[in-house]
């Protein structure tokens, strides 16, 4: 077989995989959160045999679907300039996150149902969290750089948790907020975190996440959090 024939065959296989993944996404977006192979093949206009020729099992199909969705997200992504003002960066970031989270909501709900049984979806979640963190750290590098390492880690985790799908789902599905309201809550949360930290860092003050000094305990009372040795010393011999 010539190289051209091999290339053509490879291109057709790739196109078939894209069609199948598109059908999978379309069914989920239509509300079918756990579509069967039969449904996916019918939606794609291919035989079930063709589906299994291109994907060895549902795990590999979910992996292919996730990759296709991620590629589309990357194509649609418009970066926020890190040198604009902090309020503007927060507003743009939150608007972008809200639009993204709303667009992937059906797929995210479907993934939530199957993740406990799917190593692929478990790894996809970890990868997504890494991507959220990397994007957040790049956009708010200046504010994060002013923090001590321990504070930076805690603050970054708090901010990324607020911007993750789980928080968005809570706002939209459990609390019943509209898209605009949920976006406002996200923006309010990140504004409070970022402006507080920026102000504290500028003044050299303690930032959220560090414990204040424990006040002295009254005579004869063990201070909260004291070690066993400290408690024994405060209590006297015996």
Image (tube, rainbow, N blue to C red):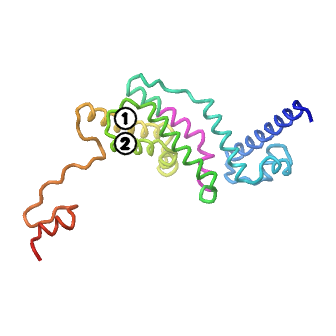
- Per the image, label 1 sits on a secondary structure element best described as helix
**Which of the two labelled residues, at mark 1 and mark 2, occupies the earlier sequence position?**
1
Which quadrant holds the N terminus? top right
**Magenta stretch: includes residue 234:** no
Residue at horizontal 66%, vertical 41%? 67
Residue furthest out toward the front: 2
Residue at horizontal 87%, vertical 35%? 6
**Magenta stretch: includes residue 105:** yes
CA gap between label 1 and label 2 equals: 8 Å
First to last magenta residue range: 94-113
Give the label on residue 99, or none: none
Which quadrant holds the C terminus? bottom left
**131 in relation to 58, above or below:** above
Pinpoint residue 175: horizontal percent, then vertical percent.
47, 50
Query: Is disc 1 surrounded by few (<14), some (14 to 19) or many (20+) residues within 10 Å?
Result: many
Residue furthest out toward the bottom: 238
Question: In the shown orientation, is residue 21 left or right of residue 110?
Answer: right
Pinpoint residue 230: horizontal percent, then vertical percent.
16, 64
**Prevalent SS, magenta region:** helix
**168 in relation to 135, above or below:** below
Residue at horizontal 50%, vertical 49%? 166
From the viewer's side, name the closer residue of 232 and 184: 232
Query: Is disc 2 surrounded by few (<14), some (14 to 19) or many (20+) residues within 10 Å?
Result: many
Q: Find residue 104 and report its image quarter.
A: top right
Pinpoint residue 147: horizontal percent, then vertical percent.
32, 37
Which residue is disc 1 drawn over? 144
Which residue is disc 2 drawn over? 155
Pinpoint residue 73: horizontal percent, then vertical percent.
61, 34
Q: Find residue 145 and report its image quarter.
A: top left
Check whether the beta carbons of the residues at disc 1 and disc 2 lie within 8 A of each other.
Answer: yes
């Amino acid at each position: 077989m010539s190289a051209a024939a091999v290339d053509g065959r490879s291109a057709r296989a790739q196109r078939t995989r894209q069609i199948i993944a598109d059908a999978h996404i379309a069914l989920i977006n239509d509300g079918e959160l756990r579509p069967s192979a039969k449904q996916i093949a019918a939606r794609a206009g291919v035989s079930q045999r063709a589906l299994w020729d291109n994907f060895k099992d549902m795990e590999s199909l979910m992996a292919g679907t996730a990759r296709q969705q991620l590629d589309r997200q990357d194509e649609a992504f418009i970066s926020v300039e890190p040198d604009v003002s902090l309020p503007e960066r927060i507003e743009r970031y939150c608007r972008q996150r809200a639009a993204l989270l709303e667009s992937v909501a059906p797929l995210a709900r479907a993934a939530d149902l199957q993740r406990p049984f799917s190593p692929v979806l478990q790894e996809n979640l970890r990868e997504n969290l890494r991507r959220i963190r990397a994007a957040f750290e790049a956009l708010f590098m200046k504010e994060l750089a002013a923090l001590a390492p321990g504070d930076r880690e805690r603050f970054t985790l708090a901010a990324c948790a607020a911007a993750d799908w789980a928080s968005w789902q809570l706002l939209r599905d459990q609390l019943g907020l509209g898209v605009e309201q949920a976006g406002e809550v996200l923006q309010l949360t990140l504004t409070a975190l970022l402006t507080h930290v920026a102000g504290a860092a500028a003044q050299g003050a303690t930032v959220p996440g560090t414990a204040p000094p424990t006040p002295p305990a009254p005579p004869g009372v063990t201070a909260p959090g004291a070690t066993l040795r400290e408690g024994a010393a405060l209590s006297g011999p015996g």
